[in-house]
Image (cartoon, rainbow, N blue to C red):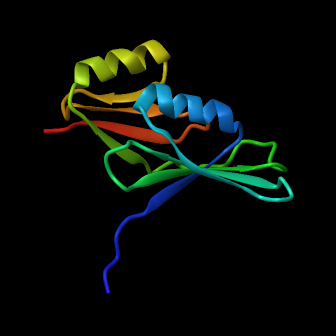
Amino acid sequence: MAFHFAHSNFNVLDLERSIRFYREALDLHEVRRYEAEDGSFILVYLGDGRGGYELELTWLRDRTEPYNLGENEFHLAFAVDDMETAHRRHEKMGCICYENPDMGIYFIADPDQYWLEIIPAS
């Protein structure tokens, strides 16, 4: 028996806005989608086109208030081969929420305020 990572999930209020953010900020693209027959929810899986790991975005029709992320002490990390270019992109988007120059990392926040760590690939 062997386990492997499949996906992580974030619940989002505005699905199309979130899909657009992840495409623009991290080059993630829709891999597949599942829509409930009654329209109560939509699942969209995003991938980077290189690995099998995916980010599942869940939209719930009846959800109207922002999600309570607690102290937001969790995050996903993305490695990038060009930190300067990535930083300029995220700075232009206005989504950088925390920087740690001593460690050479920074965080961006998605439209629902989930934090995403950006780290150098090397």
Q: Nearer the viewer, residue 113 or 19?
A: 19
Q: Residue at x 41, y 32 (%)?
A: 26
Would residue 10 appear left or right of 14 to someone viewing this image?
left
Up-down relation of residue 21 to residue 61 (above or below): above
- Quadrant containing the N terminus in the rendered view: bottom left
Residue 38 pos. (x, y %)? 86, 58
- Residue drawn at x 18%, y 30% is 102
Q: Position of residue 42 (x, y in %)?
A: 71, 51
Q: Nearer the viewer, residue 24 or 75?
A: 24
Q: Position of residue 25 (x, y in %)?
A: 44, 27
Using residue 15 as the reference point, say whether residue 96 is left or right of it. left
Check the image and name the residue furthest to the bottom: 1
Quarter of the figure with the C terminus: top left
Q: Report which quarter residue 107 is drawn in.
A: top left
**Image quadrant in which you'd find residue 84:** top left
Residue 93 visible at all: yes
Identify the residue at the far left of this view: 122
Left or right, 101 with reference to 67? left
Give the percent coordinates (x, y) of residue 116: 42, 40
Question: Does residue 32 appear left or right of residue 121 in this picture?
Answer: right
Q: Please say if 19 is above or below 55.
A: above
- Can residue 111 be seen in the rendering of this structure? no
What is the number of callouts on the image? 0
The structure residue drawn at horizontal position 32% and vertical position 51%, both measured from the top left corner, is 51
